[in-house]
Image (cartoon, rainbow, N blue to C red):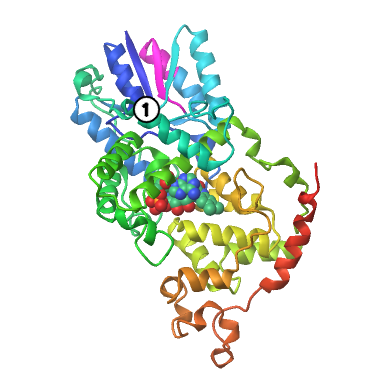
Amino acid sequence: TSSLVWLRRDLRVFDHVALHQALQDSAVVHCVFVYDTTILDALPRRDRRVDFIHASIAEVAAELAELGGHLIVRHGDPATEIPALAAELGVGAVYCNHDYEPQALERDATVARTLRDAGRRFLSFKDQVIFEKSEVLSQTGGVFSVFTPYKNAWLKKLDADPSVLAPYHIEPHAARLAPPPSPAPALPTLAELGFEPSNLAELNIPTGMSGAARLFEDFLPRIAQYKDARDFPALKGPSYLSLHFRFGTLSVRHLVRTVRDVMARGAGGEGAPVWLAELIWREFYAMILFHNPHVVGGAFKPAYDAIQWETGPEADELFAAWCEGRTGYPLVDAAMAQLNQTGYMHNRLRMVTACFLIKDLGIDWRRGEAYFALHLNDFDLASNNGGWQWASSSGCDAQPYFRIFNPITQSQKFDASGKFIRRYLPQLKDLSDKEIHAPWLVPRMLPLDYPGPIVMHDEARKLTLERYEMVKKPG
Ligand code: FAD
């Protein structure tokens, strides 16, 4: 029998569940990646994520060739491309790894149905996370909606059976990979896919399996300091691996195994368990999305859907100022500049900017969520939605509605010397470390090439408390 492995958000050729299983079960294994026009057609013609996928696919293709195999690349709607390719190759089954997003589940159901109607099988495996769906439940069998007990149960489950981290090797049966046709077709260029290069290369963002490995190697010696460094955007505190988590150029099992080894050697300090907890947040939000698809477009806590957000031209102008980083609050504006220029935003700043949009500008969190979805390199539906609903207080285990970040004190606390702000707002470079957090209070410097504050925080705070008043009421 022969089979087809369909790569999606698992762009690697090591420790890969679907590929491992297909190689075990079949005499001949083909591999395919489909540039999905149902997603790509809606994107701007310059998109760092498309560049990232394009570069990572080249690495997958090269690695498969090294093993004697070949990567087939298609450009179209996978719902028709996959069954058509399966028929063309005459395979008995299509293998892939689970995707938990509602649209992806729908797509996979369609593909599975079409394949089944043609007498072929569709097999999907857990690969993207350590524990999925209903694998981590409360003692009474309920789905968690609070993080800490979920995390404790997750850790307990892993301690009880660490074999879930065992690698899924490819090499033992690599000879079963279907060889390339002769002559092997060239991979499509970006231009052939209808895209222009973004600034990804200029930003030195490492791509593919090798890029993920390099970033992880760079991070490991810093992991012990993660707890102390991670909240300060001017420091190299986090791992910068999120883009690789998103596209599966790394193996989560490998990462968790390595971090546990570091901890077992006593080398992880206070940082390693905190970093591990972040990976569990990722799985928590994936689990929440799987069980609560209504969070796409709606509040996790439905009472919050009744909140009246600011609308109309004035709100549109406030929203545009937020998007373009001209709110007059330097930390918010520097953060938005980081997002717009690089596609990355530091986690602390994602919280600050999201909270500012919702609770200082009174704008619907869904507008911010959509902006992040378009601009974040690491955009992930579950984590992005979880982050936004945390900030809007409408999510599971969210920030309470009356907790409203003060953008000035956040700036004083997390970018005390203004180093991060100066990196993205060079026009403020001459302000002192003390002045830089609220330039409008520095009359001698005015007029700066920098806007005044678009709202006053204290007034906005009061309005927000009134706006949220309704969710306090029962029902
Ligand atoms: P590290 O600090 O090194 O963390 C390691 C990994 O843990 C990350 O790569 C990520 O996979 C995971 N992780 C860390 N923090 C979180 C978290 N709070 N929730 C879920 N997973 C987490 N993360 C995304 O991957 N995609 C998104 O679209 C996204 N949108 C967000 C929107 C908002 C409003 C907020 C507040 C957070 C969002 N996050 C998102 C979570 C977090 O900000 C990023 O994962 C993190 O900043 C990525 O940087 P890093 O890889 O250097 O993280």
Q: Is residue 87 magenta?
A: yes
Can you give x and y, in whole percent of width and height, for residue 290 in the image?
56, 31
According to the image, label 1 marks what residue? 160
> Is 407 on the left or on the right of 14, as rendered?
right
Kindly indicate the quadrant of the structure image that contains residue 358: bottom right
Q: How many marks?
A: 1
Does any portion of residue 129 appear in the rendered image?
no
Kindly indicate the quadrant of the structure image that contains residue 245: top left
Compared with 375, 95 (above or below) is above
Looking at the image, which residue is at 37% across and 37% down?
A: 248
Looking at the image, which residue is at 52% across and 26% down?
A: 134
Q: Residues within 10 Å of mark 1 (few under 14, many from 20)?
A: few
- Report the quarter where the C terminus lies: top right
Looking at the image, which residue is at 40% across and 39% down?
A: 247
Does any portion of residue 469 appear in the rendered image?
yes
Kindly indicate the quadrant of the structure image that contains residue 416: bottom left
Can you give x and y, in whole percent of width and height, for residue 231 in the image?
44, 61
Looking at the image, which residue is at 76% across and 49% down?
A: 471
